[in-house]
């Protein structure tokens, strides 16, 4: 069977059962089965797929059809141009979360911007670590710490920090910001914000992401009040909080930030135009 025919077979097998991107998924699974980069695979349409890889490919397709995400099947996901190991202990990084990182990078003081010490940033609910590790990679001058309530997630995160940065980051175990220390210049967070009902639906449909990374309570808003209150206490004067939100949560989370004392609170949209990030400052308003 040729690469072209195998891709057509896989795309057909995934259509219907796996909404999203059946061709891309099939191409990722076939290139992994053949031990080949995806770009090279797509340039090899007339080539034959050897029997071993073809058998592996069909086994991966059937795992995908049972609802396992491509990222968990392959064991990694690209985020902000870097590769993160992922498995069912952590949420799979979403492209939408890149806007959280971009907002965080724009809110960080410049290198040397705090005269008496290094600029400090904490990533709460870090999961795979993709947000905090990206910030550490983009801004090596910043002291980045990360935390999560799940020891399993922190194990994945620690391995990712070493693989991506070639060094360890300061990791703490704890809910919300209990593992973070004053003074911080930026708090960044992608808390669980999916409603309990929707989390149940995702699980029933075969989703294997950790419930604790998705379920944000009845309206998905349970974690934001504690996040805003604790961040306000831990931030230095002029510091900022930036959090990811579900697309219908902008107004509610803005109000929660303002209740906690944040000023200049703004809602930003992701590339699809959906509200995705809320940010606010402690006193001195910065851009
Ligand atoms: N964006 C994720 C989703 O749509 C949810 C991530 C989260 O709860 N932090 O499933």
Image: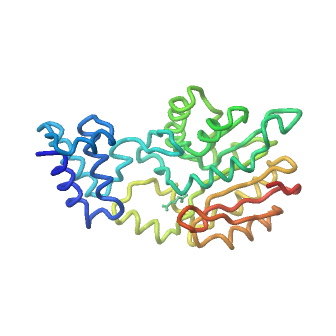
**Going 88% across and 57% down the picture, which residue do you hit?**
283
Question: Among all residues in the image, which is located at the extreme top?
Answer: 166
Q: Could you say which is closer to the camera, residue 2 or residue 9? A: 2
Q: Position of residue 243 (x, y in %)?
A: 66, 57
**Going 31% across and 52% down the picture, which residue do you hit?**
25
Q: Quadrant of the rendered structure where residue 56 is?
A: top left
- Numbered-mark total: 0
Q: Position of residue 197 (x, y in %)?
A: 47, 72
Coloration of the structure image: rainbow
221 sits left or right of 25 in the view: right
**Going 60% across and 56% down the picture, which residue do you hit?**
191
**Going 68% across and 73% down the picture, which residue do you hit?**
251
Q: Position of residue 172 (x, y in %)?
A: 64, 39
50 is higher (above) or lower (below) than 45: above
195 sits left or right of 234 in the view: left
Q: Could you say which is closer to the camera, residue 85 or residue 219? A: 85
Q: Which quarter of the figure is the N terminus placed in?
A: top left
240 is higher (above) or lower (below) than 35: below
Q: Position of residue 57 (x, y in %)?
A: 21, 45
Q: Which quarter of the figure is the C terminus placed in?
A: bottom right
39 sits left or right of 252 in the view: left
Q: Quadrant of the rendered structure where residue 193 is?
A: bottom right
């Amino acid at each position: 069977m040729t690469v072209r025919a195998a891709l057509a077979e896989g795309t057909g097998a995934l259509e219907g059962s796996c909404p999203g991107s059946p061709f891309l998924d099939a191409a990722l699974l076939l290139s992994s089965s053949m031990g080949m980069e995806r770009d090279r695979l797509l340039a090899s349409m007339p080539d034959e797929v050897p029997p071993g890889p073809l058998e592996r490919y069909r086994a991966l397709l059937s795992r995908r059809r049972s609802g396992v995400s491509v990222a968990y099947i392959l064991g990694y996901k690209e985020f902000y141009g870097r590769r993160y190991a992922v498995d069912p202990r952590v949420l799979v990084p979403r492209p939408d979360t890149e806007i959280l990182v971009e907002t965080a990078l724009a809110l960080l003081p410049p290198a040397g911007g705090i005269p008496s010490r290094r600029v400090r940033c904490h990533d709460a609910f870090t999961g795979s670590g993709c947000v905090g590790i990206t910030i550490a990679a983009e801004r090596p001058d910043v002291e980045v710490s990360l935390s999560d309530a799940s020891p399993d997630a922190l194990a994945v995160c620690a391995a990712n920090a070493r693989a991506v940065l070639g060094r360890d980051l300061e990791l703490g175990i704890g809910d919300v910001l209990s593992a973070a220390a004053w003074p911080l210049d930026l708090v960044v967070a992608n808390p669980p914000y999916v409603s309990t009902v929707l989390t149940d639906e995702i699980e029933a449909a075969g989703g294997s992401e950790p419930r604790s990374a998705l379920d944000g309570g009845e309206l998905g808003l349970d974690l934001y009040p504690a996040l805003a209150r604790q961040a306000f206490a831990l931030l230095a004067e002029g510091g900022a909080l930036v959090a990811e939100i579900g697309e219908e949560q902008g107004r509610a989370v803005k109000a929660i930030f303002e209740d906690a004392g944040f000023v200049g609170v703004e809602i930003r949209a992701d590339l699809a135009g959906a509200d995705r990030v809320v940010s606010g400052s402690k006193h001195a308003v910065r851009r």
